Amino acid sequence: MSIVKTSAPAKPAPRSARMPRADVVEMFTRLRELNPHPKTELEYSSPFELLVAVTLSAQATDVGVNKATRKLFPVANTPQAILDLGEDGLKKYIATIGLYNAKAKNVIAACALLVQQHGGEVPRDRAALEALPGVGRKTANVVLNTAFGEPVMAVDTHIFRVSNRTGLAPGKDVRAVEDLLVKVIPAEFLLDAHHWLILHGRYVCKARKPDCPQCVIRDLCRFKQKTAA
């Protein structure tokens, strides 16, 4: 099993009391007012480019991935084009990204399967996506949600933390949080919820010191250890 696909589980975040449904609606109403059309910070122009970018982003920053793909995608942005580069050729473009050796191997293997089994197209199917080397449930969910508009929830460390701290969807592991988020988030918000939550966790509800004084949902949040101004 590949290194990328078996990344360590997210560190448990402090769990809070469940947020009432009325507060959940209010929470996402406010997040939507601040950012009506949220999107991933990864740069891509096709489902395949997104798949590669998300695969490369494991244990790496979106900024670092974008720097690499800005050079890679103009040269090779299809499965066959990346196969033509070869593993060593691909490494030259992604060597600045953590775990690039394992990621290059996975991307090449995934491209081979896409060409052999899917006509070079990214499948709109969770099982088929997860069968690709380097693609786990989170990556599959990102592609299904962002590239294909499926109302699924990809839970990373930011979303895991926000869900537990706020009381939106407390859970002991990533899958428990994912399943609960899908249940408690109203349908009108579900498609964009992944982006709102990840951005909130990245820039406001930060791991070491959440910026509670500037938080738009401070009064709704169940986190007991809020930071002071």
Image (cartoon, helix red, strand yellow):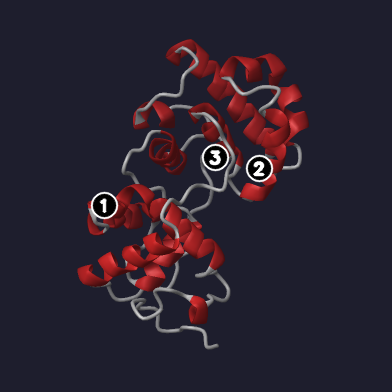
Residue 33 is situated, as x and y percent measured from the top left of the image, at 39, 63
Find disc 3 in the rendering and name its residue.
Answer: 54
Label for residue 188? 1
- Residue type at mark 2: give it: Val
Q: Distance between the residues labelled 1 and 3?
A: 25 Å
Q: Kindly give the residue lying farthest to the bottom in the view shown.
A: 228
Q: Distance between the residues labelled 2 and 1?
A: 31 Å
Label for residue 65? 2
- Label 3: which secondary element: helix
Instruction: Look at the image and tell me whether residue 170 can be seen.
Output: no
Q: Which of marks 2 and 1 is nearer the N terminus?
A: 2
Q: Kindly give the residue lying farthest to the right in the view shown.
A: 92
Q: In this view, does 89 lie above or below 103?
A: above
Q: Is residue 42 above or below residue 202?
A: above
Residue located 48% across and 64% down the image: 200
Residue 199 is situated, as x and y percent measured from the top left of the image, at 50, 59
Label for residue 118? none
- Residue type at mark 1: give it: Glu
Q: Is residue 142 above or below residue 157?
A: above
Who is closer to the viewer here, 223 or 151? 151
Residue located 38% across and 33% down the image: 148
Residue 11 is situated, as x and y percent measured from the top left of the image, at 49, 63
Quadrant in the picture for the C terminus: bottom right
Quadrant in the rendering for residue 151: top left
- Residue type at mark 3: give it: Val
Q: Distance between the residues labelled 2 and 3?
A: 9 Å
- Label 2: which secondary element: helix
Q: Earlier in the sequence, mark 2 or mark 3?
A: 3
Who is closer to the viewer here, 20 or 91? 20
Residue located 45% across and 65% down the image: 161
